[in-house]
Image (tube, helix red, strand yellow):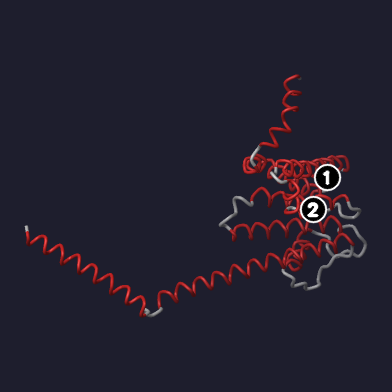
Amino acid sequence: MEKIIAWLKTLPKTLHDMPMEEWERGNRWWLLGASALFLILYSVNVLLEPPSGVSLAIEVALDIIWAFYAIDYALTMYVAEHSWRWLSGHILGFIILLLPLVPGMRFARVVSAAYAIHTGVRGWVRGHLNLYIIGACALVISMGAMVALEAERYVPGALITSYPDALWWAFVSMTTIGYGVYYPVTVTGRLITVVLVLAGIAIVGVITGSCVAWVIREVGINDEKDAPVTKGQADKLERKLEMISDKVSDLNRRMRSH
């Protein structure tokens, strides 16, 4: 017990002196593990509809994981060299953490889990933008559909009553197609629609930018291959050939002198 108390006393200084890179490497797996557990438990609760006692236990576990996200955010801010500057650059995460406390925004716990996944994997996806986009799309559509299903399923007049229907609704909402065959009738469902549409606009913009960059890169490469030699390039090549010729002549003179 004394060792634990001594460790707790030294913990604040240890965290304060820890480099941010080391801290992020250390808590990455905790974030990803907590997020995976959150998504599994939430999926079980929505799709399998367990008995009330089990469902209540799952809800408590989900709240504990959300509290873990809040603690991790606070500790990361403490570890940062300039805490308030770090907070100003991560204000979105702060807002996402607070949203579940707002009445009617309990579903935002799922957004907190998605943000934690983003925080955990962002160091790995650098240079793998396509993989990140595919994973983000799949996560947003699947979890958005699940949240909408939970909010809409038993409401009178609801159109989203099964997970396949919810997936289709989430897809057409995220891509901003909006056929109107399925649409939410609850306030929570409509808020989720707003989140999906905004996420869809952002992701479609990234995809469009990536495609344009690829086209420009490919066209640029082909242009470089097919472009005629300029006068400057020709002059530079001629000078190099003259230097090589001079060196060969000098080498021949040396060989004859010997």
Q: Nearer the viewer, mark 2 or mark 1?
A: 2
Image location of residue 152, percent across then percent down? 86, 59
Say which quadrant the N terminus sits in: top right
Q: Earlier in the sequence, mark 2 or mark 1?
A: 1
In the drawing, what numbered circle is on residue 50?
1
Q: Residue furthest right?
A: 156
Task: Give the quadrant of residue 2.
Answer: top right
Whether 159 is drawn above or below 31: the answer is: below
Task: Give the quadrant of residue 71.
Answer: top right
Return the residue nearer the eye: 169 or 47.
Answer: 169
The three-letter amino acid code for the residue at tag 2 is: Ile
Q: Residue at x 17, y 65 (%)?
A: 248
Image location of residue 7, percent across then percent down? 72, 26
Mark 2 and mark 1: Cα distance apart in space: 28 Å
Q: Residue 252 vs residue 187: left or right?
A: left
Whether 153 is drawn above or below 65: the answer is: below
Say which quadrant the C terminus sits in: bottom left
Whether 235 is drawn above or below 66: the answer is: below
Task: Give the quadrant of residue 41.
Answer: top right
Q: Identify residue for label 2.
A: 96
Return the residue nearer the eye: 184 or 243.
Answer: 243
Whether 176 is drawn above or below 49: the answer is: below
Return the residue nearer the eye: 24 or 141.
Answer: 24
Badge 2 marks a residue whose secondary structure is helix
Q: Residue at x 24, y 71 (%)?
A: 242
Q: Residue 240 vs residue 5: left or right?
A: left
Image location of residue 232, percent across then percent down? 36, 77
Give the total number of marks visible in the rendering. 2
**CB atoms at circles 2 and 1 under 8 Å apart?**
no
The three-letter amino acid code for the residue at tag 1 is: Pro
